[in-house]
Structures are given as C-alpha cells and as structure tokens.
C-alpha cells in the first residue's frame, strides 16, 4: 500500500478573485488610516494646523504609534485572510467587510444624522 503525499486543493478562480479584492482593500484601508493618523499626529505634536497652540508631544507620539500600527495592520490582516480563507463563502465575507463595510456604516449611522428632522 502506497501513500500519496498530501496536496491541498487549489482554490477556485472565484475564491482567488474575492481574496484579491479583499487583500487590496485591506492594504489600502490600512494605508489610508495610517496616513490620516499620521497627519493628526503631526498636528497634535507640533500644535500647528492653521494657527498654533500648545504642542502636545506625548499625545502626538502616541498617535504616531497608532499610525505605525495601522500601517502594519492592513498587510497583516491581508496575509491572515489570504492564508486562512479557502472557500467562496469565507472570501465573500472578507470582501464584503472591506468593500461594503465602510459604506454600510455610513448608510446606517451617518446618513440618518445628516437628514433634516421634520
């Protein structure tokens, strides 16, 4: 009796496409969030945006650390998703969270605040 070596099944093209969409979205989301946090960190650290006030170096450095963490979090989540997701359903959930998640949040929480109350 011979044993064949274990070879994992290759994912379908649909899984690969959804994983690619989710991975790009995760990396770009991390970059955008890190950029925003870095700009806020610089403003808080120096105390100057349009006019200048008291600089807050400790808070600015903490926000800078947050920006660095967000910069690493996007690719780390993309790697985790890429290695762990093998089904179309799992890839669709990741892609939905990345692509539809921010828009869904805006629709559910922000838009009702902006509509006039009669």
Image (tube, rainbow, N blue to C red):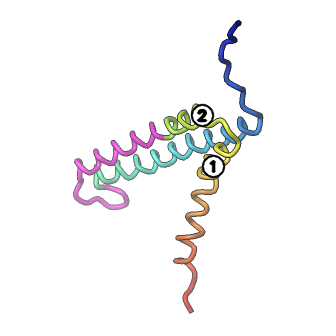
Residue 103, located in which quarter of the rendered image? bottom right
Q: Quadrant of the N terminus?
A: top right
Let me know if residue 61 is in the magenta part: yes
Q: Is residue 82 above or below residue 104?
A: above
The dominant secondary structure in magenta is: helix
Q: Residues within 10 Å of mark 2 (few under 14, many from 20)?
A: some
Task: Confirm whether residue 20 shows in the render.
Answer: no
Q: 14 and 1: which one is in front? A: 1
Q: Secondary structure at mark 2?
A: helix
| Contact between labelled residues 2 and 1, with CB atoms less than 8 Å apart | no
Please tell me which of labels 1 and 2 falls first in the chain. 2
Q: Which mark is residue 66?
A: none
Q: Determine whether 22 is above or below 9 in the image.
A: below
Q: Residue, x 68% and y 46% (percent of image)?
A: 89
Q: Which residues are magenta?
A: 48-73
Query: What label sits on residue 82 in the rendered view?
Result: 2
Left or right? Give the position of 54 relative to 84. left
Residue 53 highlighted magenta (yes or no): yes
Q: Which residue is mark 1?
A: 93
Instruction: Name the secondary structure under disc 1.
Output: helix
* Residue 12 visible at all: yes
Taking the spot 64% from the left edge, 47% from the top edge, the residue there is 95
Find residue 27 and report its horizontal and vertical position in percent. 55, 40
Residue, x 62% and y 40% (percent of image)? 24
Quarter of the rendering containing residue 13: top right
């Amino acid at each position: 009796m011979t044993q064949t070596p274990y070879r994992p099944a290759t994912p379908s093209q649909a899984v690969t496409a959804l994983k690619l969409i989710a991975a790009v979205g995760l990396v770009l989301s991390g970059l955008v969030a890190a950029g925003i946090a870095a700009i806020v960190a610089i403003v808080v650290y120096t105390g100057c945006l349009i006019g200048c006030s008291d600089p807050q170096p400790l808070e600015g450095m903490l926000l800078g650390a947050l920006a660095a963490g967000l910069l690493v979090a996007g690719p780390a989540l993309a790697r985790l998703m890429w290695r762990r997701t093998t089904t179309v359903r799992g890839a669709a959930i990741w892609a939905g969270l990345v692509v539809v998640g921010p828009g869904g949040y805006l629709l559910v929480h922000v838009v009702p605040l902006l509509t006039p109350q009669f």
